[in-house]
Amino acid sequence: MDLPGQLSSLLRAGAVLTGDDMSAYLQDWWGRQTGSALCVTLPKTPEDVAAIVRACADAGHAIVPQGGRTGLTGAGVPGAGDRPPVILSLSQMRRIRKIDAINGSIDVDAGCVLSDVQSAAICVNRLFPVSLGAEGSCQIGGIISTNAGGTNVLRYGTTRENVLGLEVVLPDGTIWNGMKSLRKDNAGYALRHMFIGAEGTLGIITGAVLKLHPLPTAHATAWVGVSDPELALRLLNRLQSCCGERLTTFELMNAEQLEGVIAYRPTVPSPIDAAWHLLIELADISGPELLSEMLLASLEAAMSAGEILDAAIAQNGTQRDNFRALRHGTADANRHIGHVLSADISVSVSSVPRFLTAASAAVRTLYPEAQIVVVSHMGDGNVHFAVRFSHGDWGSYDDPAGTVIAIRTIVNDCADALGGSFSAEHGIGRKLIDELRKRTDQAGYQSMHRLKDAFDPRGIMNPGCVLGEQDQVS
Ligand SMILES: Cc1cc2nc3c(=O)[nH]c(=O)nc-3n(C[C@H](O)[C@H](O)[C@H](O)COP(=O)(O)OP(=O)(O)OC[C@H]3O[C@@H](n4cnc5c(N)ncnc54)[C@H](O)[C@@H]3O)c2cc1C
């Protein structure tokens, strides 16, 4: 029996897709990468996942774990190689297994959609804080495997800081049960951290215990205009001094980015006119009046000091949602307007303005026709620095692949020069393996290979993702 037939015999009817039924699973979020697969499998339980992995391991056949396909580095969809892999989609594993409000933990299947987990936490008066534009589609296994960041990292950390335990099917098909809901556990190596951010190259996450936080009862949200990023940094410093931990969100974008969002979503009006825009949010369990007064006082002081140009404070939930929609709409707008080449770099928070000046100047020198589109989780030092070409300009280039590499190199060199990273929160995927090889310290890079070999000696887990398939450890 061939492998799809064998997998069909192990799973319930309809759990193995082939031919045209696979098409939705073969394309990345950008619509730029279409791969091929032997079949798509839709397991319902960890035991189903283990059975699929065992069958693939016996056949020496590659597997691509797949979540909501919202990843931005092409990690969750296969390439177009000679030996198409088996896609293992977690989309049918969506059970909330247990919630313990007092312990502040929730046990979930890896295929749960992020927004469903956020809602389940709210039902018991708790917060699961990871929040990003794709939260209505991305899955818990996906955000863990990419160690996603988002708009609340400033206060709550990345996904890594919000994972207490994991259940993982290892590359030989055994199930590792690490579903612990403990705040303290020094019993040997903290294995879960190996799988967080591993982009499905070390095993398949089937379940997770996530950390819950007290649910804020009050929010104060503002849209603020500044004339340059250096002044935004001063405002960040002021808010951290005045509001401390209550500051959850400090997001920067330039006017070009905001114009793109509004052109794509004309129903949400621009709150103010400025060269640079900030979305700021405070959250607390105190009364809303206290929080609004605190934000207003800080913004008034900033205005008097000449740090900000203008500000609008959300007066109700609808206005707050509108402000947040402008921020969360950036990726969608960039997908639809022009041809966008996007980098995801990080530098120290205080270096963000210097990075922006250097990268903008370098790109403008070589590509004066391009538009620079910036959106930044500034409170975390993370900048999505995008270079946008009109379709006409892009279509006229003789060597588009060379242009992609040239811009990536210019921008990542600027981050490197400031001690930064070329991959802040989106991972490596299939897009940045050359950058990882080139920009990572050799001892670290070789250790990554050894780790991969130890977990997955046959190289069947998401090959060609993170580490190049052809790489040798010297
Ligand atoms: C509109 C939009 C906004 C975004 N905003 C942000 C943001 O603010 N911050 C941020 O960090 N990211 C952001 N992202 C990208 C982010 O990486 C993804 O949205 C999310 O983390 C991926 O989840 P997914 O379920 O779609 O995973 P997929 O894209 O399906 O997969 C991503 C990787 O995880 C692996 N994987 C998936 N599930 C499993 C599993 N169960 N076990 C093992 N491996 C698995 C895949 O093999 C792949 O390597 C955004 C994306 C979009 C489209």
Image (cartoon, helix red, strand yellow):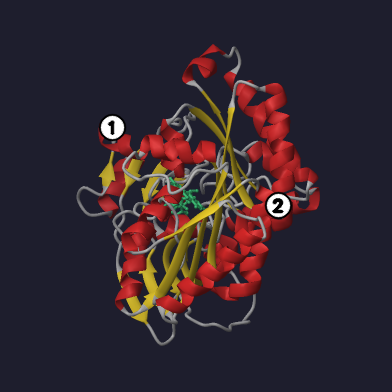
Coordinates of residue 397 in the picture (x, y in percent): 58, 14
What is the quadrant of residue 332 in the picture?
Answer: top left
Q: Residue at x 59, y 58 (%)?
A: 455
At label 1, the amino acid type is: Gly
Location of residue 154 in the rendering, given as x and y in whole percent from the top left corner: 58, 65
Query: Could you tell me which residue is drawn at 32 percent across and 53 percent down?
Result: 91
Query: Where's residue 359, x and y in %?
Result: 70, 37
Question: Circle 2 — which element?
Answer: loop
Give the class, few, some or many, for how many residues have Cα within 10 Å of label 1's Cα (few <14, many ≥20). few
Q: Identify which amino acid the numbered label 2 is placed on.
A: Val
* For residue 383, side relative to residue 437 (left or right): left
Which residue is denoted by mark 1 in the rendering?
19
**Disc 2 marks which residue?**
347
Measuring from the top left, give residue 429's x and y in whole percent.
Answer: 55, 43
Figure check: 249 above or below 187: above
Kindly state the secondary structure of the residue where label 1 is placed. helix
CB atoms of marks 1 and 2 within 8 Å: no
Quarter containing the C terminus? top right
